[in-house]
Amino acid sequence: MAETTTRSALPKGFRSAEQGWPELHRIPHPPHRLPLLGDVLGASRTTPLQDSMRHARRLGPIFRRKAFGKEFVFVWGAALAADLADETRFAKHVGLGIANLRPVVGDALFTAYNHEPNWQLAHDVLAPGFSREAMEGYHAMMLDVAGRLTDHWDRAALAGRTVDVPGDMTKLTLETIARTGFGHDFGSFERSRPHPFVTAMVGTLAHAQRLNTLPAPFLLRRSARRNEADIAYLNRTVDALVRARRTTSGDGDLLDRMLETAHPETGERLSAENVRRQVITFLVAGHETTSGALSFALYYLARHPDVAARARAEVDRVWGDAELPGYDQVAKLRYLRRVLDESLRLWPTAPAFAREAREDTVLAGEHPMRRGAWTLVLTPMLHRDPAAWGADAERFDPDRFDPKAVRSRPPHTFKPFGTGARACIGRQFALHEATLVLGLLLRRYTLRPDPGYRLHVTERLTLMPEGMRLGLERRAAVEVGSPERCPVRGAGE
């Protein structure tokens, strides 16, 4: 019998679908379900999201999957997702994959349960760090880190080498969030191998992913020991960063806010443990998703030279002869922003978000849900729903984000940053950084794809194009002013 929920408490731990969906039998599931094992035939441990996308295409806008006694309900239909966006009836659910990260970051912004007070405290303290004034302050540091990327790519272009796009975008976005948020330099572009922080971070994400796909954690003893070592390294790195800041004065960045700012109403401050958790969260989430977004955008720009030419013409027109684009000039790259949005539509790097019922309700007037029942919204499939995006939803077309086209679509059909009060706090930071970097790269290079490359998407809770490399050709037209001066560096550098 399904567990009954009351107003005072919800079931603890993982809640299988039969606990919250009274008419679960009406929701389709894959054929050939096996006793005890569930829907495991043909399933892949390494690409569970893409497996679910394949099932979604066959089973429709709501379906379920079961593995080793755990049943999940998936939603991707636009009408269903729009109903789940109703904050009066639904809230964020910290699902299994996110809960697996709580040993790393505890009750930080991304992983806190709705009832935990540290989420609201941290959100209210840190939200001003993403205001327009704060963003303008980050702009110069973003340009400086982008200059390190273009120095690296210039050397590759001169030598006739291709560049590792996902690897270099990871270096770029890690250095950007580390510099702008915490005044730290990991020296990523001076390293031949990823910084140990990145290795540890990828290890914790991979371990969390593996926990999702195995019936019992004891099967991952060796991985669990490695995960403990990775967490310890992340903690040591951040603790050293915080200790160094306590002995010096910063410039009002996110870390300063964490250490010095009290809640405007209660006067409460973040504890030392909570500061550590938030720093790790921003370092991980603040670069992992943006690096994927940039990589997918560069994939599509390289594969669609007509789109790249149109975006490049806009950059040349808007930025003109300026050596360095100003903060406001980035927002004027409206077509390039459409390219980024269309890339995020097809491959949102945070590919799912979970919602739970605040009270007993009926989803879209059709599916009863008990209080605490939850579902996982498959964002790449929501972004491909023909009901919202048309019969050609699989096709890359930035003009889908022309203002007129956006107004013609129903709301809640584009959700690359989640939804509601718990949507990504850093989304404007990520969008400004990504648009700026794409503009700089298009202004400087012609992108040459590898004709033999076929898009392969790797999953580690976030999505990334694996093994993608590009050839580069420097554009003579971007040499503004003195030929010795780098167009993305300041005078005298």
Image (cartoon, grey):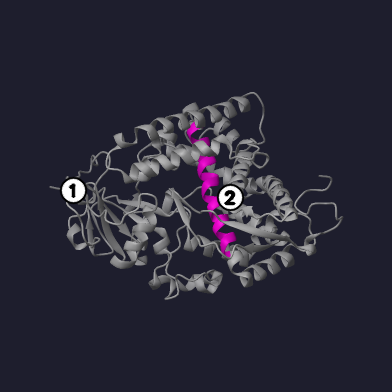
User: Dot 2 surroundings within 10 Å: few (below 14), some, or many (20 or more)?
Assistant: many
User: 267 or 168: which is nearer to us?
Assistant: 168
Q: Amino acid at mark 2?
A: Phe
Q: Which quadrant of the rendered structure holds the C terminus?
A: top right
Give residue 456's position: percent from left, percent from top.
Answer: 48, 58
User: 88 or 424: which is nearer to us?
Assistant: 424
Left or right relative to 131: residue 81:
left
Give residue 468's position: percent from left, percent from top.
Answer: 56, 56
Q: How many marks?
A: 2
User: 205 or 327: which is nearer to us?
Assistant: 205
When the figure is inspected, residue 389 is found, relative to residue 147, above or below; the finding is: below
- Point out the frontmost of discs 1 and 2: 1
**Residue position for label 2:** 429
Numbered disc 2: secondary structure: helix
Q: Is residue 86 visible?
A: no
User: Dot 1 surroundings within 10 Å: few (below 14), some, or many (20 or more)?
Assistant: few
Q: Amino acid at mark 1?
A: Leu
Q: Residue at position x 79%, y 55% from top?
A: 323
Q: Are marks 1 and 2 in contact (CB under 8 Å)?
A: no
Give residue 436's position: percent from left, percent from top.
Answer: 65, 55
Mark found first going from the N terminus, 1 or 2: 1
Q: Which residues are magenta?
A: 276-300
Q: Residue at position x 78%, y 54% from top?
A: 487
**Residue position for label 1:** 36
> Which of the 4 quarters of the picture holds residue 77?
bottom left
Asked whether residue 280 is drawn in magenta, I would say yes
